[in-house]
């Protein structure tokens, strides 16, 4: 099995980085690793077809958007010029750099 989860833990497609939702309502779930769409969760489809649990399961990273966990770290190169008023604290986030330039 993959080192991403314990042997006793069943793979949860919603927490897998290879899982995606398809545009097709007839087969709404997809596995990008194995390249198929299904009416049921891909891990269940793999178990039903092969008789073994999914070996491609990889837990999604919890690092946030683009690996940034702290939204105040965005735009740190301009932090010395940033005003310290209450209005500037509302601009913290992925677009804070753009609001400082305006």
Image: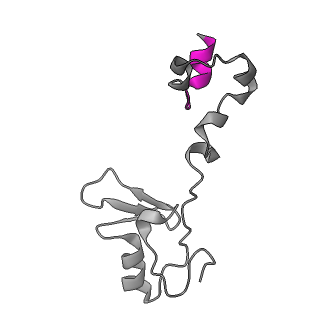
Residues in magenta?
Answer: 92-101
Q: Is residue 94 magenta?
A: yes
Residue located 61% across and 78% down the image: 2
Left or right side of 23 for 59: right
In the image, farthest residue toward the left: 26
Q: Is residue 43 magenta?
A: no
Q: Main secondary structure of the magenta part?
A: helix
Name above or below for residue 93 compared with residue 2.
above
Place of residue 98 in the rendered image (x, y in percent of width and height, measured from the top left): 59, 19
In the image, farthest residue toward the front: 85
Residue located 54% across and 66% down the image: 59
Quarter of the figure with the C terminus:
top right
Residue 75 quadrant: top right
Name above or below for residue 51 compared with residue 91.
below
Residue located 46% across and 76% down the image: 11
Name above or below for residue 64 compared with residue 19.
above
Left or right side of 47 for 27: left
Residue 55 quadrant: bottom right
Quarter of the figure with the N terminus:
bottom right
In the foreground, 84 or 52? 84
Residue located 42% across and 75% down the image: 43
Place of residue 77 in the rendered image (x, y in percent of width and height, measured from the top left): 75, 26
In the foreground, 87 or 27? 87
Left or right side of 81 for 64: left
């Amino acid at each position: 099995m993959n080192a991403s989860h314990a042997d006793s833990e069943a793979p949860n497609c919603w927490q897998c980085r290879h899982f995606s939702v398809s545009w097709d309502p007839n087969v709404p779930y997809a596995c990008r690793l194995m390249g198929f769409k299904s009416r049921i969760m891909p891990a269940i489809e793999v178990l039903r077809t092969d008789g073994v649990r999914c070996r491609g399961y990889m837990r999604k990273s919890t690092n946030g958007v683009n690996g940034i966990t702290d939204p105040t770290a965005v735009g740190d190169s301009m932090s010395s010029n940033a005003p310290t008023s209450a209005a500037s604290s509302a601009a913290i986030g992925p677009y804070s750099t753009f609001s400082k330039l305006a």
